[in-house]
Image: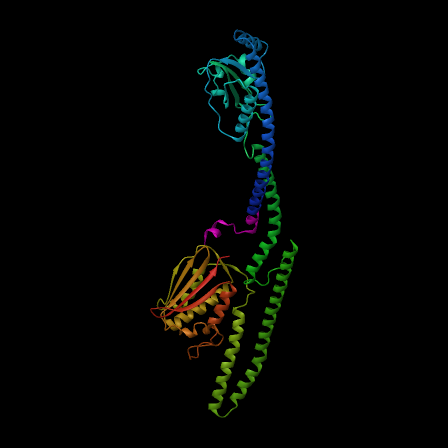
Amino acid sequence: MNLKEYFWPRSLLSRTLLLTVLSVFLAQGIASFFWYAQSKEREVEGLKSASESMAQMFASTTSFFQSLPVEYRHIALDQLRNMGGARFFVSFNSEEINIAPIEESRTKREAIQTIESVLTKELPNASNIKVEFSRPETLKVLNNSLLLSDLPKSWAHHTLSMEPLNPPILVVQIEISQGQWVYIAAILPAPYVTLENDLINADQVVFLIAITTLLLFFTFTLIRNQTRPLKRLAQAANRLSTDIEQPELVEEGAAEITTVTRAFNLMQKRLQRYMHDREKLFGSISHDLKTPITRLRLRAELIDDEVQAAKMNKDLDELEIMVKGALQTVKDTDIHENVSSVDVLQIITSIAEIHNQQRQRVIISGQQKRPFYCKPLAFKRCLTNLVDNGVKYGDEVMVYVHDSDKSLDITLLDNGPGIPEEFLNKVFDPYFRLHTDLHGTGLGLGIAKNIIRAHGGEIILSNRKDGGLQIDIAFPRA
């Protein structure tokens, strides 16, 4: 078994569900890709517009404070804070504050580039402009040793805090003169607050899972209803080899399945008629031949020539044996017998008792792990023919039983002369015999093979290297 057969589901239901899942995720992936590409472009354009607006306000604020005398700048800033502050945090610092940047993303780069471009244009006299985003917990204000969390809440809490999102904070530092820096911190406006750059957000994941679950449920229900008739059809086809009198299948399901079921029922009816006609035919032959054979025996008794009378009786004996053999073939391969669970070792042991009365001529080994279902009388007749032949022509027979998950295997080994290679398959033909003794009709192996095949099994003959015949029988587990 290769890797594809090992990992790829075997049932139609599981394969359909797997392909459904793959198709849903593939379709959602393609749709999400195009949606992401289009929405991201619109988002970037909106972010640029918002960033330009914020940069204009930053430039106006900077120009306003830059127009004031130096000694009045802090007074104006304090008055602005006392009145409730502005939409952003502003301070004047004597040095550039080191900002711990957030991770890089396209939205971050677009916002920074747009703001820098506007500020550079609106503030041509600014000697240095620094734009960066920082996390609130690492943001420094006023100097390089003071964190935002150290400030009084009234100073920047309402401006820079937005729980529970905890978004990144935009920081703009503009050097308006030597040792004079305007420090502006703000949060981007909605919906660009968090600078999200995810291809699929949590809401989309929940939606995808919900849609996939519903689709799988309806697919499972549909396929299960459609495969149920197929499963019953497969079980009926498997039982057909051992039970031809089983009831007809109900024609249901899709049109194609109904057509197959109808064809199966029709085939079963034809087989039943054939088997019934066969029984009637051989019964009629038996009845029609018994009377003339009896008359011929009576006439043979009236022949004065004892030699001719003996020859005629011999011919009549052979004719009667052939008729009985043909009838026995029909009887032993009759598939009308009910199927039941049997103990294979017990059947073989009962066959061996007949041959082991004086000495052990049939040796049995092995084990049966699970019940084996067959037609008991036909199965016993099959093994009896094989064991009898082995004892007759090989003196001793060793029988091995090996039971696995895939098949029940029975191997017979004898010590006889074996069978010439060219006759290994021909010995199954009716009335074919390698020996010329009067005991036998040449039907035993043919009957055994028919019974084995009627149970879905196979028989193989081969010659052993050390002498003798080996018979391998395999009955597959359903």
Q: Is residue 248 visible?
A: no
* Residue 430 at x, y percent in the picture: 49, 75
Q: Residue furthest front?
A: 125
**Residue 195 vertical position relative to residue 465 in the rendered view, above or below:** above
Q: Nearer the viewer, residue 363 or 63?
A: 63
Answer above or below: position of 401 versus 49. below
Residue 269 drawn at (x, y percent)? 63, 65
In this orientation, which residue lies closer to the viewer: 73 or 218?
73
The verdict on residue 410 being magenta is no
Report which quarter residue 350 is drawn in: bottom left
Instruction: Please name the residue shown 57% across and 46% down the image.
Output: 17
Q: Quadrant of the N terminus?
A: bottom left
Q: Residue at x 61, y 46 (%)?
A: 219
In the depicted view, which residue is nearer to us: 368 or 418? 418
- In front of the other: 210 or 379: 210
Q: Position of residue 69 (x, y in %)?
A: 54, 8
Task: Check if residue 5 falls in the magenta segment.
Answer: yes
- Indicate the colouring scheme: rainbow
Horizontal side of residue 376 vs 42, given as left or right: left
Q: Is residue 15 visible?
A: yes
Q: Residue furthest bottom?
A: 304
Q: Main secondary structure of the magenta part?
A: helix
Determine the residue positioned at 57% across, 18% down. Answer: 59
The furthest residue to the left: 466
Q: Position of residue 383 (x, y in %)?
A: 45, 66
Q: Which residues are magenta?
A: 1-16
